[in-house]
Amino acid sequence: MGKKILTEHIDVPGIETFDVYRKQGGYTAVEKAIKTMTPEAVVEEVKKAGVRGRGGAGFPMGMKWSFLAKPEGVPRYLVCNADESEPGTFKDHYLMKNIPHLLIEGMIVSSFALGANTSFIYVRGELMYVIKILEKAIAEAKAAGFLGKNILGSGYDLELVVQPGGGAYICGEETALLESLEGKRGNPRNKPPFPAVKGLYQSPTVVNNVESIATTPWIMNNGGDAYAAIGIGRSTGTKLISASGHIKKPGVYEIELGVPVEEFIYSDEWCGGIRDGHHLKALVAGGSSVPILPAGLALKLANGEPRLMSYESLSEGGFQTGTMLGSGGFIVFDETACIVRNTWNFSRFYHHESCGQCSPCREGTGWMEKVLHRIEHGHGSLHDIDLLVDVARKIEGNTICPLGDAAAWPVASAIRHFREEFEWHITNPFEATQPGAVFRGEMALA
Amino acid sequence: MTTTNTTRTVEFTPERLAQAKAVIAQYPAGKQKSALLPLLHILQEQEGWTSPEGMDYVADMLDIQPIEVYEVASFYTMYHLEPVGKHVIEYCRTGPCCLMGGEEVYAHLKQKLGVEAGQTTADGLFTVKEVECLAACGMGPVFQIREKYYMHLTNERVDEIIDELSK
């Protein structure tokens, strides 16, 4: 059993209530931080912990906090990004629904560290039932004196606002989220200025993912060094992995970073292996936007060493032979999965979710979807494969926000590793368009 | 200031008006436009859809131009800009759900109701809408009706749900 930091108490009956959460040691981090520490000392512990942004970017959270501008007389804001929308990712949903007070406690600790007196939790609107769970938790915490005016007699005031989104993947991008929170369309902003200088209402703002903020109570209680001792190398701590697809036990698992990918897939503690009678064909390790890997490269690095569930190991080999940990959206494909169809599906997603601001993304995602649609439906030509690679390359890096990259990577990587399967669709259109038809060439399965 | 040729007006019920005012009060002074998305949800909850008259009403309440509401309502996917059936089935069409048989179950749902994506059944009971990932990939296939998630869908489960809601 690996170390559990976020989910240790998640199965305790009634943990969604203040009283039970409190009995399990909840809110002691708020007491410790507010009564015995300075905001700077809290930031220092989070820096020492080395916790990296759990929304997908992996940027060190303490460093992000230390960039926050602190001009006199200007309010500062903390905004929690709970817009979880990356296909394959459902860990924040799980965490907020089951143990809402963990996020509330983390929000109080983090807001105190940043000197914010109004903080926001921006939750995707589809999760309205979770919003109600969070609002109830906030009311309970407020009644117990952990929120509102003069928290625990310290003179520190904090209000928490839960904000629903309206249905838009792009609002998971932090500047689009801020636009949305201001009541506008979710068009990402040009950077600089970064939110740390001009964010919500043009004031200094930190935006952090749910899971990132939820680490702070443990870090307060146990110290940054203790957190940094968990995990492997610069991948400190634990990570929630959302496991889906052709595995025996889909679900959310908290792992200590550094577990071998093979163990995560096949151990009964986690995914329990590929469903009966089937074999691993491919893996998307960190949400739909990260490069897809064939079975061999998913389990082992190019040099034959085991690949680990860590930021570094998953990205080992760059995009030629590696991928990214991303948000931890772990999608497993067995040999019945059609890579062309899945790539078309993901392309349709990014086309649908492009905000339309930047031409390469607005147009390019549509072109990729169309070309993939015609290959999948038996009307492709061999030239289309290189056309897709070309369009993907022209989107990547040429847009205001990373949605363009997120749209390009799945397409480029699918062709890189499964080109034969695309060719088969094009040269065998009749066979390939039969219901349930899947390429069964010389493919290495695990 | 309305741009629609109708005399129908929309007003929140007293309870929803109080709810809307509490939402607006959460933001710093002068930043009431932040309440736009939440207010549109309240509007749709009351009216069943996001009507032009309702949007004008929200614009008035927030002291912003109607276009500021229309452009936002049309950007986000959750706001129904046309009348919908009593139950809007928002069906996830994204990859992980498809791996779990989501496409077959979706075909069954549409066949059972006799509608395509975006259409409403003749009796006005159901509208089928395709949506992207609902953040429940491990429990797929998934659809949502208002706040409720229906997970681990199969053809049989879909039949049960539709039959139950048709009563």
Image: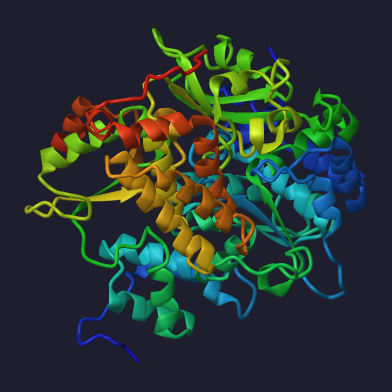
* Residue drawn where x is 82% and y is 60% of the image: A115
* Residue drawn where x is 24% and y is 28% of the image: A431
Is A176 situated left or right of B104 in this image?
right
Q: Is residue A324 visible?
A: no
Residue A380, image x, y percentages: 33, 44
The total number of labels drawn is 0
Is the N terminus of chain A in the top left, top right, bottom left or bottom right quadrant? top right
Is A58 situated left or right of A99 in this image?
right
Above or below residue B134? Residue B74 is below
* Residue drawn where x is 88% and y is 74% of the image: A72
Above or below residue B135? Residue A169 is below
Is A224 situated left or right of A30 in this image?
right
Residue A21, image x, y percentages: 64, 32
Task: Please state which of residues A442 and B25 is positioned toward the viewer in this rendering.
Answer: A442
Q: Residue furthest left?
A: B122
Above or below residue A368? Residue B12 is below
Residue A398 occupies quadrant: bottom right
Residue B33, image x, y percentages: 53, 75
Residue A429, image x, y percentages: 26, 35
Residue A328 occupies quadrant: top right
Is A144 situated left or right of A156 in this image?
left
Above or below residue A8? Residue B126 is below
Q: Is residue B95 visible?
A: yes
* Residue drawn where x is 45% and y is 47% of the image: A127
